[in-house]
């Protein structure tokens, strides 16, 4: 593995030449006597949707926090585009194209919806043609992103006045502003109605294709993750108990017993 974090910032990535975008290698994470993650390993292929499922407390969000630099593992490595990024800070990783959402959307409530997206654009990996663009161009781009997530009509509304569903859409808009290569989604379907879940899945499919994204997704809404994911990784008590295509995982006795249930 060559090159430091500075060299990676302007990395030109040929996804077709890679076997994996992310490799998680033997990750262990402890909180005092609690073993949150115990030797978790898997890889994420370019352009695939990898779903991560498991019961509450299985270690899913802890795993996301390790991958995105919010936590440093006690053992193991995270490799991104062939480079070891273990323990690198989140603001560095966002410039490399690793962007994530959070379970609870926390916008800057005193700012408008548009201004929230502008903040994401200020942290984008690169300006247009490699140069920093003017504010009028940034505002135009922010409005375009809000159109993608159907929030253009709330552009000037305070983010604190948005509904739960609208806050989740704003959370997605903010990470799209970072111009990600890999999008990590943490329970973006939670609290949505069945119709809203269908809308969200259709939106994510469209964004994935248009932006040429790789997606890693934590989700409890089985209808969504089974239909959207190419592969699943299942965690239970901090350990990986299954990995494979959704239909294979759904029939795995260990997964049925630990999480899915007989129905």
Image (tube, rainbow, N blue to C red):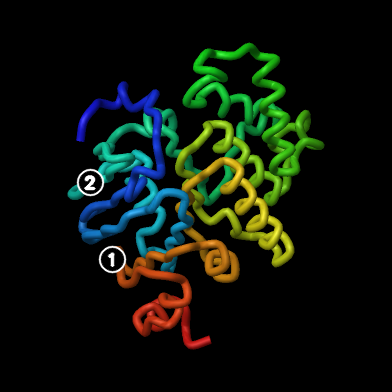
Residue at image x 58%, y 44%? 105
Q: Give the numbered dot on residue 239.
A: 1
* Residue 200 located left or right of residue 216: right
Q: CA distance from mark 1 to mark 2?
A: 16 Å
Q: Is residue 64 visible?
A: yes
Residue 16, given in percent of the width and then of the height, sits at 40, 44
The residue to which callout 2 is attached is 77
Q: Which residue is farthest bottom? A: 262
Q: Is residue 28 visible?
A: no
Q: Is residue 172 above or below residue 28?
A: above
Q: Which residue is farthest front? A: 17
Choose mark 1 or mark 2, whichever is in front.
2
Q: Residues within 10 Å of mark 1 (few under 14, many from 20)?
A: many
Q: Which residue is farthest left? A: 75
Residue at image x 55%, y 48%? 104
**Circle nearer the N terminus (1, 2):** 2
- Viewer-proximal residue, 95 or 70? 95
- Viewer-proximal residue, 189 or 98? 98
Q: Secondary structure at mark 2?
A: strand
* Residue 194 located left or right of residue 68: right
């Amino acid at each position: 593995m060559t090159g430091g974090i500075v060299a990676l910032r302007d990395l030109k990535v040929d996804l077709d030449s890679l076997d994996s975008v992310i490799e998680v290698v033997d990750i262990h994470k402890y909180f005092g006597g609690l073993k949150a993650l115990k030797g978790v390993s898997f890889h994420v292929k370019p352009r695939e949707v990898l779903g991560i499922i498991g019961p509450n407390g299985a270690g899913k969000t802890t795993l996301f926090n390790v991958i995105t630099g919010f936590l440093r593992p006690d053992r193991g490595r995270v490799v991104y585009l062939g480079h070891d990024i273990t323990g690198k800070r989140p603001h560095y990783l966002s410039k490399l194209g690793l962007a994530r959402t959070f379970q609870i959307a926390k916008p800057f409530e005193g700012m408008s919806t548009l201004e929230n997206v502008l903040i994401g654009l200020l942290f984008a990996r690169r300006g247009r043609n490699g140069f920093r663009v003017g504010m009028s161009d940034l505002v135009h781009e922010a409005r375009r992103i809000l159109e993608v997530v159907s929030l253009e009509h709330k552009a000037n509304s305070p983010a604190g006045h948005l509904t739960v569903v609208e806050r989740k859409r704003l959370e997605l808009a903010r990470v799209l502003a970072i111009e990600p290569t890999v999008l990590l989604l943490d329970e973006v379907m939670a609290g949505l109605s069945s119709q809203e879940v269908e809308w969200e899945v259709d939106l994510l499919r469209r964004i994935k294709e248009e932006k040429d994204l790789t997606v890693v997704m934590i989700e409890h809404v089985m209808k969504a993750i089974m239909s959207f994911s190419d592969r699943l990784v299942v965690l239970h008590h901090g350990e990986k108990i299954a990995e494979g295509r959704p239909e294979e995982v759904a029939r795995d006795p260990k997964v049925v017993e630990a999480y899915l249930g007989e129905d």
